[in-house]
Image (cartoon, helix red, strand yellow):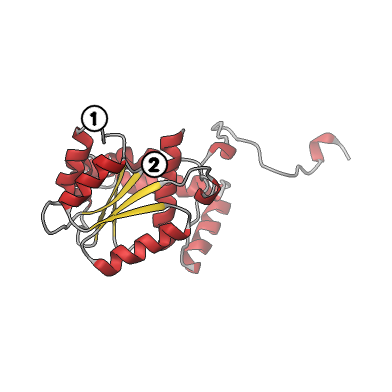
Amino acid sequence: MPEHTRRRRGRPPAGAHGDRVIDYPQLALRVPPSTYKRLQALAKLERQPQWRVLSHVLEHYIDLMPSDQRALVDGLARRAGKALSASRPRRTVDAPHPVTLLNVDDHEPMLFARSAIFRAEGFHVLEAQNGRMALDMARRHRPDVILLDVHLPDINGVEICRQLKANPETSGIKVVQLSATTKSPRDQLYGLETGGADIFLTEPLARGTLLSVVKRLVKATAA
């Protein structure tokens, strides 16, 4: 068979844009069947891979936003991008020394549930039910990561995070700020910029999502 008619197999070439798809983060995404069919149709029409079509659509959607909303998107991506785009870490249970996690929440059932999730993954879990206890335990035990609820009975979680990040002894601890009531991107960005948390998550939150975020933060710290 002539070389110019031979069917090429395997990974498609990078293309005119010079994309190296192998370097891109992997994305698991659930979409309705009708949306996926449109994506397939659009990719075929444009003769582009689906990932590039998604990228173009996303950029176009952001371009149509008001300027203040675009700034919020950029701010949130800038603050959380490194933690979320890190490569998948190996399971924590394989590590020679368990990762220490401080779980801070005044709601006892939620405190218990989160602690159980991370203990099952091999983490060494400490617990605190108010802000003063959280600050004291962070200074004494120097955990690798803190799960910090925003609404605590004595000190607001954003203020706790600010104090931790301002103290050279605890500034390197990764902080995951959690809130069941904060829904607005503005509030999330405020928490990130004011408190200095490494990432701000809103609940309800899937178990796998929380585990993935924490493990990526731990991996980023170790790198």
Binning the other alpha carbons within 10 Å of mark 1 as few (below 14), some (14 to 19) or many (20 upward) gives few
Image coordinates of residue 88 in percent, x first then y, are 51, 45
Which residue is located at x 24 percent, y 40 percent?
A: 139
- Identify the secondary structure beneath mark 2: helix
The answer to whether any part of residue 117 appears in the image is: yes
The answer to whether any part of residue 70 appears in the image is: no
Q: Taking 123 as reference, is 155 left or right?
A: left
Quadrant of the image containing the N terminus? top right
As drawn, the residue found furthest toward the right would be 1
Image coordinates of residue 25 in percent, x first then y, are 50, 43
Q: Which of marks 1 and 2 is in front?
A: 1
Which residue is located at x 50 percent, y 41 percent?
A: 87
Residue type, label 1: Pro
Q: Which of 14 and 2 is in front in this view?
A: 14
Binning the other alpha carbons within 10 Å of mark 2 as few (below 14), some (14 to 19) or many (20 upward) gives many
Residue topped by disc 2: 83
Image coordinates of residue 223 in percent, x first then y, are 46, 33
Find residue 107 and report its image quarter: bottom left
Q: Nearer the viewer, residue 217 or 34?
A: 217
Residue type, label 2: Ala
Which residue is located at x 23 percent, y 62 percent?
A: 180
Point out the tag, 1 or 2, that comes first from the N-terminus: 2
Which residue is located at x 66 percent, y 41 percent?
A: 12
CA separation in Å, label 1 and label 2: 21 Å
Residue topped by disc 1: 168
Q: In this view, does 190 lie above or below 122?
A: above
